[in-house]
Amino acid sequence: MNNKKKQNGFTIIEVVLVLAIAGLIFMMVFIALPALQRSQRDMQRKNDLSRFEVALASYQTNNSGALPSGMDSSASTSWSSFLSRYVIVGGDKFTDPSGTDYMLKDTGGVNSTANIPNFDASSPYVYITTGATCNGEDLTMGQGSRKVSFQMKLEGNGIACAHN
């Protein structure tokens, strides 16, 4: 005769197993989340370079194909003036996803790929190289005086490059 009553419920092993599986899932999410956020910020940076590229096309249309020259903000055709008149329109902002304003740096027509420092959210630079087009992350120099490339170091490593 079996006098044991069947008890409903979970054994301690079942509870520990469920908690271990839940812990693994949470750990995977918390490991993947920073990488996803970094990837999203880098995608925004690439979109900002595209915005810069479209603004340059508008500038060139209005100025017989000419490019802005130099970084002197007093010149009416400088890159700083271009930024304020063509990129930042109607009180819009042109800032890095970290909230810092982008800074422009003219490379003087020298291939800047090797000279771009590591990413720094406190001073996100857009490197401007005239006479160059993008070839992946690298530049192809000697493409004519009306060509320009824009490069930006990405947070998740690599360089984003866009050109007209």
Image (tube, rainbow, N blue to C red):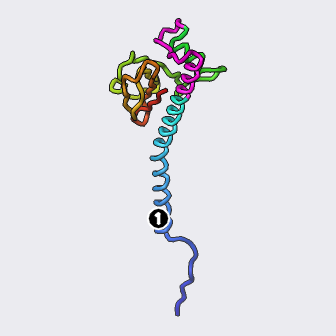
- Residue 3 is covered by the magenta coloring: no
Image height of 112 relative to 154, above or below: above
Question: Which residue is found at the position 51% from the left and 29% from the top?
Answer: 49
x, y percent for residue 119: 41, 28
20 lies left or right of 94: left
Q: Quadrant of residue 142?
A: top left
Q: Which residue is mark 1?
A: 17
What's the residue type where badge 1 is placed? Leu
Nearer the observer, 151 or 141: 141
Residue at 36% in and 27% down: 113
Secondary structure under tag 1 reads helix
Give percent across and percent down for residue 18.
50, 63
Magenta extent: 51-75
**Left or right, residue 90 beside residue 145:** right
Please name the residue shown 48% across and 55% down the image: 25
Specify whether residue 63 is painted magenta. yes
Is there any visible trace of residue 39 in the rendered image?
yes
**In which image quadrant can residue 155 be found?**
top left
Q: Position of residue 144 (x, y in %)?
A: 42, 21
